[in-house]
Amino acid sequence: MMSRVGVPRRCSSIATALALALCSAALGGSSVGEPPPELTTTDYVAIQQLYARFNTALDTAQPEEFAGTWTDDGEFIGGRGPGRSGESRTPIAGRAQLLEMARRAGIGPRHFVANLVIRPTAEGASASCYLLLLNARKSPLKFTESAIYEDTVVRTARGWKFKKRINWRDDDDISPYKPKPLSGLAP
């Protein structure tokens, strides 16, 4: 059967499918509605190690190693404690600001993360984990913060890196994860 322009319908369908495939490849791969590429076991381990290197470098005053866990345009948005939700949340962005953030931390805090969940995305992965922060400068140790990190991580030529990290403190008034009181129970 012929189409209205004189091309057999089968050829027209093949040409349309080929054009769609080429457009999809040019736009970065997957078609609308397709799941993101799967991560390998090696990817999951490398991302977990990224989290360990981030915390260790920050807690042991290694600013260069800490900055090395980020993309050059990486961005960190810190949470705010109770009553400070209206304060500016200007991201710490780029290598120079991230280095300065690490230099201010010094030795003493201990970042513990758990419940790491990694989800593949078209750009790399989104991840989240719980944070428990302790102050080891005092004895006994003092618990100072609990939070949830929301992260965007990407694969680079030098391994997996943080692209964006948001700290949602549990005591931050605008945190989407702020624990709610149990109803009907005394505080």
Image (cartoon, rainbow, N blue to C red):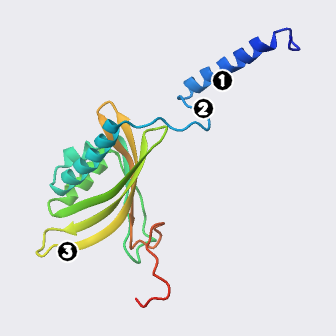
Neighbourhood count class around disc 1 (C-alpha, 10 Å): few under 14, some 14–19, many 20 upward: few
Q: Quadrant of the C terminus?
A: bottom left
Q: Amino acid at mark 1?
A: Leu
Q: Quadrant of the N terminus?
A: top right
Q: Amino acid at mark 3?
A: Lys
Contact, CB < 8 Å: mark 2 with mark 1?
yes
In this view, the residue in front, 33 or 91, is 33
Mark 1 and mark 3: Cα distance apart in space: 58 Å
In the rendered image, the vertical position of residue 44 relative to residue 28, given as above or below: below
Name the residue carrying label 1: 20
Name the residue carrying label 3: 142
Q: Amino acid at mark 2?
A: Ser
In the rendered image, the vertical position of residue 170 relative to residue 55, given as above or below: below
What residue appears at the point 22 percent right and 68 percent down from the top-left corner? 134
In the rendered image, the vertical position of residue 105 relative to residue 137, given as above or below: above
Counting residues from the start of the chain, the first of labels 2 and 3 encountered is 2
* Quadrant in the picture for residue 27: top right
What residue appears at the point 53 percent right and 28 percent down from the top-left corner? 29
In this view, the residue in front, 59 or 12, is 12
Counting residues from the start of the chain, the first of labels 1 and 3 encountered is 1
Q: Is residue 125 left or right of residue 22?
A: left
* Quadrant in the picture for residue 109: bottom left
Name the residue carrying label 2: 31
Counting residues from the start of the chain, the first of labels 2 and 1 encountered is 1
Q: Is residue 153 left or right of residue 51?
A: right
In this view, the residue in front, 103 or 154, is 154
* Residue 71 seen in render: no
Judge depth for marks 1 and 3 and give the one in front. Answer: 1
In the rendered image, the vertical position of residue 74 relative to residue 30, given as above or below: below
What residue appears at the point 82 percent right and 9 percent down from the top-left corner? 7
